Image (cartoon, helix red, strand yellow):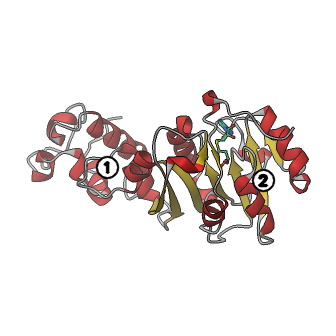
Amino acid sequence: MDFVRPKKHLGQHFLKDENIAEKIVSSLTGKTKNVLEIGPGMGVLTKYLLKDESILLHAIEIDRDSVAYLTVNFPELRGRIIEGDFLHIKFDTIIENENFSIIGNFPYNISSQILFKVLEHRNRIPEVVGMFQKEVAQRIAEPPGSKAYGIISVLLQAYYDIEYLFTVNENVFSPPPKVKSAVIRLTRNNVQKLDCDEKLFKSIVKTAFNQRRKTLRNALKTFHFNPEMINNEMLNRRAETLSIAEFIEITNWVIVEN
Ligand code: SAH
């Protein structure tokens, strides 16, 4: 097989630009030996990852044609490429116990689900370098106060430092996607546990942003706040203006009934 015919439903847009591929791979800072590439496709990143001797590369690819292509063209990867769905794979079947970093030009149709899975396993994943649709990348990296700041920004920024690295044009892909892309880096911060009930934090953040035009007092009506806090000015604000620390503070005002 000479090439993989791109399939739209798998979000296949193959990167053609070698310089950009090299730049993405060199954005990993070497926090772990194990690196997991999501969706290698025809291996444009894989090639540079395999050249780096400090890396032990693993790859997961859902597309049978791509796996066949990679097996022929990158025999070094044999045994460490899995044909499967990243969203359903149990990490221990690929890399047992050890930490690993993640890299990929991600399929845009599942990029938020990839990030939620990263969050779930954050204590094993110190670094993620990935290509996203530009709007998604901006949303993730955005500080409080901006329109794009939302649920995923808050949840990720609670545990990761996020850097917007560079923007990538449509025309370096085959076929070109309809949107611009961007590469970002997530670096795990040193927060082991938030200073509040983490489940409640998540639920407060989600509820607050689901009614982002309302003040928090109205958006969070279903939560039972400590009566001393109910007149606090912070509740006059909207979700998009709150920092992570302020969301934690508000979470601690909720009275949990058992
Ligand atoms: N990394 C390649 C391909 C990017 S396109 C490049 O830069 O050229 C996205 C890739 O993700 C495709 O190869 C697609 O088959 C793969 N993919 C899509 N959904 C996936 C999933 N759920 N799990 C693993 N791989 C997936």
Q: Secondary structure at mark 2?
A: strand
Query: The disc labelled 1 sits on which kind of residue?
Result: Tyr
Q: Is residue 11 above or below residue 50?
A: above
Q: Is residue 198 above or below residue 167?
A: above
Query: For residue 214, what is the image quadrant?
Result: top left
- Where residue 149 is drawn, which disc sits there? 1
Assess mark 1: CB under 8 A from ligand 1? Answer: no
Q: In the picture, which quadrant includes the N terminus? A: top right
- State how many labels appear: 2
Question: Which of 162/3 is in front?
Answer: 3
- Percent across and percent down for residue 143 are 31, 58
Residue at x 30%, y 60% (from the top left corner): 245
Query: The disc labelled 2 sits on which kind of residue?
Result: His
Question: Which of 103/74 is in front?
Answer: 74
- Percent across and percent down for residue 149 are 31, 49
Q: Look at mark 2 in the image and give the residue it sits on.
A: 58
Q: Indicate the quadrant of ligand 1 in the picture.
A: top right
Question: Which of 49/222 is in front?
Answer: 49
> Counting residues from the N terminus, which is met first, the one under dot 1 or under dot 2?
2
Assess mark 2: CB under 8 A from ligand 1? Answer: no
Query: For residue 161, what is the image quadrant?
Result: bottom left
